[in-house]
Image (cartoon, rainbow, N blue to C red):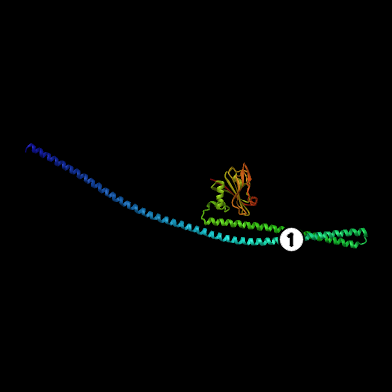
Amino acid sequence: MSKQEESAMDHMTFCTSSLQALMRVVRQKTERKDGEIERLEKEARRDVIEGLQVMEALIKQMSEFTKESVEQQEQQFALIRSENALLQKKVEVCGKEIELLKTEQQHFELEKNTLFESYEERMAQLHMEITNKNKEIDRIENEILGVVNQKTISEDFRGNTKEEGDAGKQIEIADLRNRIETLKKEVDNLKGQAEVNAQTNDVMWVTIMKGRNENSILKTLILEHQKGRVMKEIKMFDDAVLMCDYRKICLWTKMTNFEQIGKSENDGDEKTWSVVKGRKNVLCLKITQIGSVFGYFHSGEHPHVDKWSIPQTTDFVFSLKNLFNKPPVIFKKNINGKLEELKSNDVCLPIIVEEMDSPCLAALIFQASP
């Protein structure tokens, strides 16, 4: 064999060995790739299974959440329906109360007119009786003067010759004087009856005005309920303030939050009112025994007080409810450091101002903030 052939054989042997080695490397890599592919397939299958399990859990949770959400919504709807039913009942009750008050008011008006007519007739009758009694008193006094004059003349011209007649005249004079005293007592009694009738008339007038006030309050409450307005903001005012009054207070004070810090019966005492000392933005309300509501707002540091009283440093004083059913109004303001009454063409305002001095049933104290 020639060298050239040997070289070719060696080359072919080398190439064959290299090819075999390359095939082994390729086969090993292929086996590794197959292993990795198998591992990746297993991991993928595991991930898919875990994903399906997670999806099932999520679907289950979503269904449970949806179920809970539906139940919560149903509960909320049931609560809203019950609240609406309660409000409807309140509206019906208020409506019945208003009808009852209307009927009572009609009875009041009829009774008032009847009483006024009977009072006027009775007063005219009493005045007539008083006039007649006074005339009778004058007549009896004239008779007494006549008897006395007659007695004087009798004594001057006839002396003391008729002692028995004089004794009779004395008895007659005493009797006339007794009749005069009796008539005076009757006149005083008639005057007392007239005064009692006048006082009864005043009481009836106050009762009628109070009924009108309560009627107006109930009407406003029904309107608030029918409009569906939430009145949680005014719960703290113990039903002394309506929503329309609350808006006025917010507008006047430029405050929106009110925290009750004190409450007193009647005018209160030093212990009750000690909470206001040094505080700013203090709102105080007074509820009178006839149902009127007054108040004042003090933005600066409140001075020490030991009962219901309005400091001279108060910003303004207002009325929310009164016997005349007038809308909320400010009737005093602080002008140049002095609390002064505002001028108004309303003839009822001076009476409302005097009404604020009515006996206090309760006082409410609030801390206001923007």
Which residue occupies 57% across, 57% down? 219
Q: Quadrant of the N terminus?
A: top left
Q: Nearer the viewer, residue 65 or 300?
A: 300
Q: Is residue 282 visible?
A: yes
Residue 63, position as x, y percentages in the image = 38, 55
Residue 126, position as x, y percentages in the image = 74, 60
Residue 72, position as x, y percentages in the image = 44, 56
Relative to 369, residue 218 above or below:
below
Which residue occupies 46% across, 57% down? 77
Relative to 165, residue 353 above or below:
above
Q: Nearer the viewer, residue 50 or 90?
A: 90
Q: List the single residue furthest toward the top.
A: 3
Apparent side of residue 1 relative to residue 278 in the rendered image (left or right): left
Instruction: Identify residue for label 1.
Output: 126
Mark 1 neighbour density, 10 Å: few (under 14) some (14–19) many (20 or more): some
Q: Quadrant of residue 59?
A: bottom left
Which residue occupies 44% across, 56% down? 73
Q: Is residue 259 visible?
A: no
Q: Secondary structure at mark 1?
A: helix
Q: Nearer the viewer, residue 358 or 79?
A: 358
Q: Nearer the viewer, residue 233 or 254?
A: 254
Q: How many marks overall?
A: 1
Apparent side of residue 212 relative to residue 118 in the rendered image (left or right): left
Residue 346, position as x, y percentages in the image = 63, 51
Q: List the single residue furthest toward the front.
A: 345
Query: Disc 1 residue type?
Result: Leu
Which residue occupies 70% across, 58% down? 198
